[in-house]
Amino acid sequence: MGESNMLASLIRYHGTATQLLASLAVDLSEQDLDTPIEGYERSIRSTLQHLVEVDWAWRSAVETRTTPDWSAMAGPAGPAIADIAAAHAAGNERLLAWIAGATESDLNAGFDVHWPWMPEPNEVIPWRAISQIVLHGQQHRGELAVALTRLGRSPGNFDYIFVEAS
């Protein structure tokens, strides 16, 4: 499997697994959506929003090969879980389209980004940035799965090997 095929497979998983969790949260009460997850500062809603925003930042850096323009951040259209899920799906599709057209050089040539939380420029290598999207998402999907399970909505087995292949 080529590098771009592997990255596309991981991004498809990232999208499908995140959509599964959002589907389990879509009809929760506002209180359940906005109560911080036990042991974690974010709620279900804010965690899903965070995924959209962080994915946007990394995707924007990869697409433009420069520091993201934070004033242009494409976040959810509204606070409803369906809006957040739609924004996440659209971002994933955009990244999959970029990966489909990427050359080996596009995936491997580094560039500098000035993240607001880091004092010095940071070199970004696109394939690593795309991997970061998936791995960062995995952390938060685990937190969401715990929260949803506590509310009686376990996602069950959503391992990569089962979800991406479906």
Image (cartoon, rainbow, N blue to C red):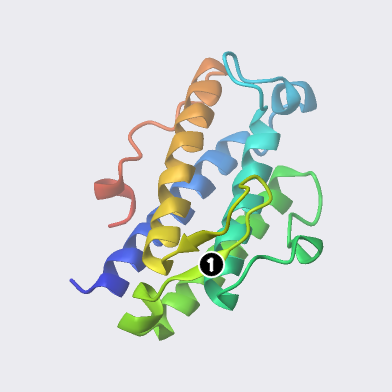
**Residue in the foreground of this view, choosing between 100 and 31:** 100
**Amino acid type assigned to the residue bearing label 1 in the image:** Asp
In the displayed structure, 109 sits above or below 48; it is below
Position of 133 compared to 3: left or right? right
The kind of secondary structure element at disc 1 is strand
Q: Which residue corresponds to the image point at 27% horizontal and 65% vertical from the top-left? A: 6
Q: Residue 29: percent from the left, percent from the top? A: 75, 26
Locate the C terminus and report the quarter of the image it occupies.
bottom left
> Looking at the rendering, which quadrant does residue 164 occupy?
bottom left
In the displayed structure, 21 sits above or below 62; it is above
**Residue in the foreground of this view, choosing between 54 and 61:** 61
Q: Total label count? A: 1
Q: Which residue is mark 1?
A: 112
Position of 127 compared to 150: left or right? left
Locate the N terminus and report the quarter of the image it occupies.
bottom left
Position of 85 compared to 34: left or right? left
**Residue in the foreground of this view, choosing between 129 and 141:** 129
Q: Residue 101: percent from the left, percent from the top? A: 42, 85
Q: Which residue corresponds to the image point at 30% horizontal and 47% vertical from the top-left? A: 160
Q: Residue 132: percent from the left, percent from the top? A: 43, 52
> Looking at the rendering, which quadrant does residue 37 occupy?
top right
> Looking at the rendering, which quadrant does residue 57 occupy?
bottom right
**Residue in the foreground of this view, choosing between 160 and 137:** 137
